[in-house]
Amino acid sequence: MRERPVPKDQEIKLGEEEFIVSKTDTTGKITYANRVFMEISGYGERELLGVQHNIIRHPDMPRALFKLLWDTLKEKKEFFGFVKNLCKDGSYYWVFANITPDIDNEGRVVGYYSVRRQAPISAIRTVEPIYREMVRIEKGAGGVKQGIAKAQGYLQDLLQSKRTDYEKFALELYG
Ligand SMILES: Cc1cc2nc3c(=O)[nH]c(=O)nc-3n(C[C@H](O)[C@H](O)[C@H](O)COP(=O)(O)O)c2cc1C
């Protein structure tokens, strides 16, 4: 098993013109990473290729959000959302991510493609406490599945009270 970096309270920011690009196979293993991805995450190409994209998963991210991400992709839809990622040295970066299925001529999903930009500070301020509460719910649920379901319920209730869904909410926050 690969050793997980120990998270530290240091934020890395993408430049205004910078975007992170990666591609995966259908199982989420990285098949392409652009230079910005490597520079920001601190991983070299050889450390990334063939490895699950959760290599940069931050423990502050709720599992329910990744469930939403994968459920969306499995429906052959694109996902928009905010993700906090973990660098090799333990620092973190917040992105606004767009992830799309890569579909061949016969309509088969052959992989996934993702582009990410710096998340606006105002969006991070809004999303962070929501994710924190979701992680708290997940940890207190007494089981992974129950935790995801409860955190999903919490997010859904919150979005419903604002008469929106996660995609609209995320796109509006990105501005
Ligand atoms: C194209 C693509 C890009 C992804 N980008 C990220 C990412 O930037 N950060 C992240 O934590 N997970 C990302 N994921 C989701 C991971 O595959 C994984 O589901 C997530 O890190 C949670 O880890 P787990 O499924 O092992 O719990 C991406 C998935 C795909 C298909």
Image: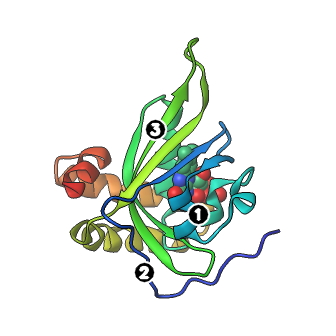
Q: Is residue 104 left or right of residue 168?
A: right
**Residue that mark 3 sits on:** 72
The foreground one among 109 and 59 is 109
**Is residue 16 shown above or below 9?**
above
What amino acid is found at the position of numbered circle 1 in the picture? Met
| Residue furthest out toward the right | 1
Q: Where is residue 175 in the image (x, y as percent from the top left)?
A: 18, 54
Q: Earlier in the sequence, mark 3 or mark 2?
A: 2
Q: Position of residue 76 (x, y in %)?
A: 48, 28
What amino acid is found at the position of numbered circle 3 in the picture? Thr
Query: Which circle marks residue 11 in the picture?
Result: 2
Q: Position of residue 11 (x, y in %)?
A: 42, 80
Asked if disc 3 and disc 2 are in contact, CB closer than 8 Å, the reply is no
The foreground one among 119 and 54 is 119
Q: Earlier in the sequence, mark 2 or mark 1?
A: 2
- Say if disc 3 is inside 8 Å of ligand 1: no
Instruction: Let me know if residue 145 appears in the view.
Output: no
| Residue furthest out toward the top | 106
**Is residue 9 shown above or below 175?**
below
Select label 2 or label 1 by which is in front.
1
Disc 2 residue crowd, few under 14, some 14–19, many 20+, Cα 10 Å: some
What amino acid is found at the position of numbered circle 2 in the picture? Glu
- Ligand 1, seen in the image, is in the quarter at bottom right
Instruction: Let me know if residue 32 appears in the view.
Output: yes
The foreground one among 34 and 173 is 34
Q: In which quarter of the image is residue 6?
A: bottom right
**Is residue 13 shown above or below 116?**
below
Select label 3 or label 2 by which is in front.
2
Select label 1 or label 3 by which is in front.
1
Q: Position of residue 54 (x, y in %)?
A: 63, 59
